Amino acid sequence: MSTWEENVRKVVPYTPGEQPKERKYVKLNTNENPYPPSPKVSAAALSFDALRLYPDPAASDLVHAIAEYHGVSDKRVFVGVGSDDVLAMAFMTFFHSGKKILFPDITYSFYDVWADMLEIPFETIPLTGDYRIDPADYARDCGGIVFPNPNAPTGIALPIEDVRSIISKNPNVVVIVDEAYIDFGGTSALTLLDEFENLLVVRTFSKSRSMAGLRIGYAIGSEKMIAYLNDVKYSYNSYTMNRPSIIYGVESIRDDAYFKETVEKVIKTREAFAEAIRKAGYVVLPSSANFVFASHPTIPAKEIFARSREAGFLVRYFDKPRIDNFLRISIGTDEEMRAYADFLCEI
């Protein structure tokens, strides 16, 4: 090893879902929305000349639109380049005690990557036998807590009373609830914000608002918490949001009717697809997300994954303990899901 390499920060990076280029697939592997963004997004005026100027570092228009939508003060909203950026900022800002932070053993696989990169000690808490978060497991001394609700990749939502239990039993640390999929089911922890100053709720435009390509994420918390986040942001990168994302994000969140219509389509398709493959013997965990987590009692998931790819269907396979016989299947259009259900039933 070269001398300079000895001082390199070495981490095991997050592995994103495959984005194929060599052939066309029915793409059900990265939880993207199968429908386009609101028509108001494409109609938004964007000055090409304005791209030579830096964007508003505070993304004020977008912050205000999000705050107005959720009925909170602008000072309680933080925005970033996708929820990954927001979560990474939150890790840097709030998990600085030296104590172990807690998150589930089966969960979003970026959490341990950020913890390793930022040298934050952590402990993973096993899900129950039926792949659920048990609030009692989090009633302990720690440096902070983060979990998705609904969880990923299982899709199972934690009841709001269980979320309240976790927060109330950890009043001295920040609890981050990652709600990337909450629009597809479950009850949001936003209802608990006025009750707990140590709660941060993180969301994204990538899933339910069909804007994964623009990278818009946000967090809502107490004014004090958001101020701390902004201090770290302005110490790291003051211009995180580009002009198109700010403009298009505002138009998206203002078109509530289109948003709700699209979400309902995905939910309806999810339930029909799950029912179809259950009839063929597949086990499908109860999902409140825009994907399902499924397995077959006799055909290994790794084999189904490979055969699916050969047939032109991309899904997600995790070669990890406890979940290596499951596939995470994103919900596409009705036509795509009928075709994939037919394929799964056939094999």
Image (cartoon, rainbow, N blue to C red):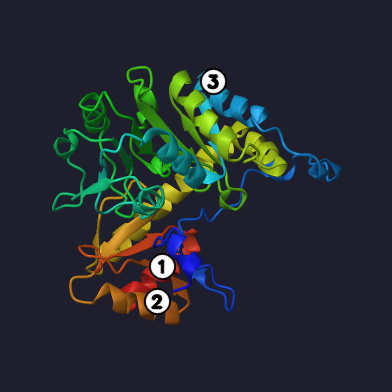
The reply, left or right, for residue 212 in relation to residue 55 is left
Q: Determine which residue is flagged by label 2.
A: 308
Q: Mark 3 to mark 2: distance in Å?
A: 47 Å
Spot occupied by residue 233 in the image (x, y as percentages of width and height): 55, 35
First along the sequence among labels 3 and 2: 3
Spot occupied by residue 309 in the image (x, y as percentages of width and height): 43, 77
The answer to the question of whether label 1 and label 2 lie on touching residues, with beta carbons closer than 8 A, is: yes
| SS category of the residue bearing label 1 | loop
Q: Nearer the viewer, residue 151 or 237?
A: 237
Identify the mark at residue 75; answer none if there is no mark.
3
**Dot 2 surroundings within 10 Å: few (below 14), some, or many (20 or more)?**
some
Mark 1: amino acid: Val
Query: Can residue 27 be seen at all in this image of the molecule?
Result: no
Q: Nearer the viewer, residue 20 or 336?
A: 20
| Location of residue 78 with respect to 269 vertically, above or below | above
Residue at 40% from the left image edge and 60% from the top image edge: 11
Spot occupied by residue 303 in the image (x, y as percentages of width and height): 30, 79
Identify the mark at residue 315; answer none if there is no mark.
1
Spot occupied by residue 95 in the image (x, y as percentages of width and height): 36, 37
Residue at 45% from the left image edge and 70% from the top image edge: 314
The reply, left or right, for residue 26 in relation to residue 281 is right
Q: Nearer the viewer, residue 132 or 196?
A: 196
**Dot 3 surroundings within 10 Å: few (below 14), some, or many (20 or more)?**
some
| SS category of the residue bearing label 3 | helix
Residue at 32% from the left image edge and 50% from the top image edge: 155
Mark 2: amino acid: Ser
First along the sequence among labels 1 and 3: 3
Which is more foreground, mark 1 or mark 3?
A: 3
The answer to the question of whether label 1 and label 3 lie on touching residues, with beta carbons closer than 8 A, is: no
